[in-house]
Amino acid sequence: MELHKQFLRAVLPSMLAFALSGVYAIADGFFVGNALGDQALAAINVAYPLTAFLQAVGTGIGMGGAVQYAISMGSGDERLAKRYFTISLALLAAASLLLTPLFLLGAERVLLLFGAQDDILVLGEEYIRWVSVGAAFQILGTGTVPFIRNMGGSVAAMTAMVAGFCTNILLDYLLVWKFPLGMAGAAAATAIGQGVTAAVCLGYFMLRKVRLSWDLGGRGPALVRRVLTVGLSPFGLTFSPNIALILINKSAAIYGGAAAVTCYAPVSYIASVIMLLLQGVSDGSQPLVSRSYGEGRQERADRFRNMAYLLSFVTALLSGGGIYLLRDQVAALFGASPEVAAEVARILPIFLVGFLFMAVSRVATACFYATGRDLWACMLIYGEPLALLGLLAVLPALAGGVDGTWLAVPASQLTAMLLSMIFMVLERRRSDAQGAPRTEDR
């Protein structure tokens, strides 16, 4: 029972934080859609992958460093753990300096590539311009939370995310509804909210007197490579739904026009909440799995992994079932027209099925990168959008139009689940043949 209590203490705050993060993701759509209508709602949906890319970069770097921090602490090497913390903060700062001008200069071209046209393009460009100004807040906000979680501060990590969420909601209300700044106001609310999260995280480090270690022992490049190698998986895990978003929006525009893109916007917002709940399970269990692995206690790591599988599947089943029962009302939350709301209710069940498959593949992916199986994690993460791309090339033609676009989504998630099950069988055979894996030679 002690392991179950430890698991729940780590995972439940993470799930709550990510659930609020899911609402955080749809807050702009809610306020803008109700204030400015269907075109603005579609513009947020098309532009959001650029915002998500900034957050995924922060998550990738932060989680890459935090995983190595947890494994190092588990193996008793506190000096190495501090080095990983220091390198990760430096990488987050460098990414902020690099991506801010790139986003300011290239956002319009990227939106055109994503399928934005006419008013959707104009509104999307305005949104991204202001998001780009606050790029550093996005990267630091998402990049520092994983370290708090891996330092045993799951409640503090939740508090940081809740503070950012509340700030974003308040500023959305003020800057979009009370002082009608439109898309610029929504973007500013998002960036400032992440800035508040980053400030809370930095305050936690100061209170805990977490020290930097610039004495890297001549191993700086090796530490950077390790952080980035591990970070590829959580980066992809965070951003892959947005790769899917880009591909689906493009396919919807081709086969269904602007009306299909607009209909997909509420679906994607609703889906993001469930995906982030599942990410809360996987990210909340990761420190437990990584530390157990670092201590050489493979059986304990396996038990935490199995608990995560069960909780993830139950979460997908219950949340998907609840949304199915409310499918006729959910689009109205975003100010969608009756025509859009009716189409959303029709297609939403197709997407809900896929979350049962995702419940398995997400946890498997997190456990693979938590224990150094970076190649398998990357194959799962990046294999899913590749499968989606292939299915989008075939299913719309077979299904006679945009319905094939919608069907491609759960089909790609099923592919990822089957691949994760194959890797789990291979992992089991490897573990049985070799015994518990040793910690990495540092």
Image (cartoon, rainbow, N blue to C red):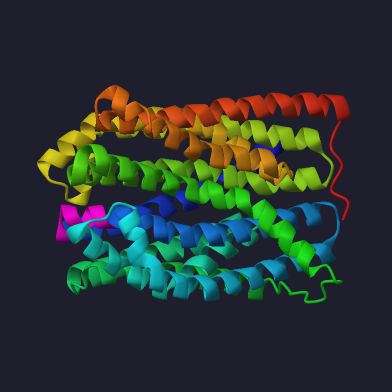
**Type of secondary structure dominating the magenta stretch:** helix
Residue 37 within the segment the image draws in magenta: yes
Which residue corresponds to the image point at 23% horizontal and 54% vertical from the top-left? 41
Which of the two residues, 386 or 215, is positioned nearer the viewer here? 386
399 to 216, vertically: above or below = above
Q: Position of residue 162 (x, y in %)?
A: 45, 60
Taking the image as shown, residue 255 lies to the left or right of residue 413, namely: left
Q: Which residues are magenta?
A: 36-43
Front residue of 159 and 232: 232
Does 184 appear above or below 6? below
Q: Position of residue 278 (x, y in %)?
A: 50, 40
Q: Is residue 408 above or below residue 120?
A: above
In this rendering, position of residue 136 left or right of residue 202: left
Quadrant position of residue 82: bottom right
Give how far across and how far down residue 200 sits, in percent: 53, 70
Q: Is residue 284 left or right of residue 415?
A: right
Which quarter shows the C terminus?
A: bottom right
